Amino acid sequence: QWAMGAPAMKSKKEKYAAVLLCIRGIQTDIEWSMFPSAALTADLAISLLSEDCWREEYDLSLTVYNNAAEIYYAIGDFDKVSEATAIVLENARVYSDKLQAYSTQISVLSSTLGKSGDSIQLGLKVLKEFGETFPSKCNMRHVRREFLRTKFMMRNKSTEAIRRLPNIVDANSVACLRILNLIFLPAYTQEPFLVP
């Protein structure tokens, strides 16, 4: 019904209001695992955005394109994922706004035959932007050094004391953990010394 009424909308205000409704529809479709329907709604939301939407409605545009990329990934339309993430990466104002697009790209690369190495490299590039660096080629020497460093940090700490530590709330640390989680399986199979 929204798609049929879209041509009747003339003002940007009406179109942006409809985009907000599309976002709600997308979220509902996702909750019910209705990904093809969510993809159609995402297409409609994108079509309703103006050419200067990133300047006029930055947060709305970011939400629409990130959601669209995730939905396209869910239905396996990797060309549309690439388009949507490229638009986000081109228009994002700050690096943290690029994270969801990068995460989606890493997921696509991880699930594409022969692209696991690329997903690892992209993940390491993103982590480097947050100050988390890894050697370009890990070996047992790196593993031993990090193991000993961690063991030293954990000295005199009981299991109970570790359990009582507060949860991580720093947004950058949480983002890094998310990226590490995404590249864990490809790294385990391709670069085992990254995840001993």
Image (tube, grey):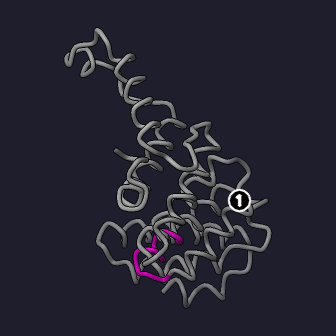
**Residue 182 visible somewhere in the drawing:** no
Tell me the residue at 57%/61% (across/down): 101
Secondary structure, mark 1, is: loop
**Residue 139 visible somewhere in the drawing:** yes
Q: Is 74 inside the magenta-drawn segment?
A: yes
Hey, which quadrant is residue 29 in on the image? bottom left
The residue furthest left is: 160
Tell me the residue at 53%/50% (across/down): 137
Tell me the residue at 66%/73% (across/down): 15
Residue 25: x and y in percent read: 43, 71
Badge 1, how many Cα within 10 Å: few under 14, some, many 20+?
Answer: few
Q: Nearer the viewer, residue 120 or 67?
A: 120
Residue bearing the label numbered 1: 57
Tell me the residue at 38%/53% (across/down): 192
Three-letter residue code for mark 1 = Glu
Query: Residue 189, relative to residue 136: is it above or below?
Result: below
Quadrant placement of the C terminus: top left
Dominant secondary structure (helix, strand or loop) of the stretch shown in magenta: helix
Hey, which quadrant is residue 64 in on the image? bottom right
Q: Which range of residues does the magenta coloring cover?
A: 68-77
Residue 96: x and y in percent read: 62, 46
Residue 71: x and y in percent read: 45, 73
The residue furthest top is: 156
